Image (spheres, helix red, strand yellow):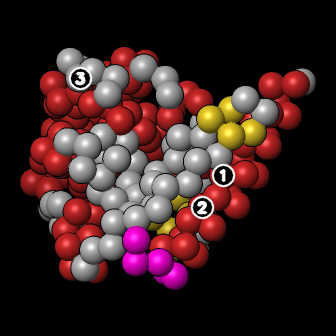
Amino acid sequence: MGNGILQRSKFYLYKEYEYLRQRLYKLSTLRTDIALTCMGINFKFAPLPYPMKKADLKVLKYPIGELKIPKKISDKDIESAIKTIEGFPAKALKEVGKLSDDTLEYRHRPGGWTIRQLVHHCADSHLNAYIRTKLAYTEKNPTVKPYDESAWANTGDAGEAPVEWSLLLLEGLHKRWAALLSELNDEDLERTFYHPEQKKKVKLNQVIVIYAWHCNHHLAHIQQAKKHKNKFS
């Protein structure tokens, strides 16, 4: 019970921290780090970003460009996207498998996540995406459960845990996910789930394209963090 109370307190402080951090960034032209400690818990949140031009920040945020879903998704698009999803765990392992703990704390942009958080986020995100895929495949337009990805990225199993845990999870998850996606026919690819935050239906062929982009998007973030070293930490 005690641990549960501590975790809930951590979440509440996290939300207050994020609000304060963003407010300070708007008011200040200087880099400011905020450290919070509560009941012996050290909060490992992103420092206040360096002042940068919006264009430069956008490049760092979207190193491969923003997501663009084709109006008409072809069989070739689907085949290529599934290959990307299937191959992602091996590429992630190659990028982070031999990194030191210090290097795993490098951030990909000012105010962004660490390499460690990026790896754990991919596991969180892709696990949710796999479940949504399977729900849409087996049910008629199910309503999926949104989640707070920033809060998930700051729990102990994401902000501090070894990346090996999520690398192992991604390896098995993506094998099953790719196998599932490969069995979908044209009719299946038109199946949908309803996203209550976005207030729209999402087709499975769109999901495949979205998460192929998501794989490459965060892989580029990891490479970017390694390139810039601890410049944003």
Q: Quadrant of the N terminus?
A: top right
Give, as a three-letter code, the residue at label 3: Leu
Disc 2 target residue: 18
Q: Name the residue located 30 percent from the left edge and 52 percent from the top edge.
A: 232
Q: Name the residue located 75 percent from the left edge and 39 percent from the top edge.
A: 38
The quarter of the picture where residue 121 lies is top left
Nearest the viewer among 41 and 206 is 41
Q: Are marks 1 and 2 in contact (CB under 8 Å)?
A: yes
* Residue 14, label in figure: 1
Distance from Cα at disc 1 to Cα at disc 3? 27 Å
Give, as a three-letter code, the residue at label 1: Tyr
Q: Secondary structure at mark 1?
A: helix
Q: Secondary structure at mark 2?
A: helix
Q: Main secondary structure of the magenta part?
A: loop
- Relative placement, left or right, of 31 versus 160 is left
Give, as a three-letter code, the residue at label 2: Glu
The percent position of residue 108, horizontal first and vertical second, equals 28, 50
Q: Is residue 164 magenta?
A: no
Distance from Cα at disc 3 to Cα at disc 2? 28 Å
Q: Secondary structure at mark 3?
A: loop
* Residue 99, label in figure: 3
The percent position of residue 168, horizontal first and vertical second, equals 37, 17
Q: Residues within 10 Å of mark 1 (few under 14, many from 20)?
A: many
Q: Is residue 28 magenta?
A: yes
The boundaries of the magenta stretch are 26-30
Which of disc 3 and disc 1 is earlier in sequence? 1
Q: Name the residue located 46 percent from the left edge and 51 percent from the top edge.
A: 46
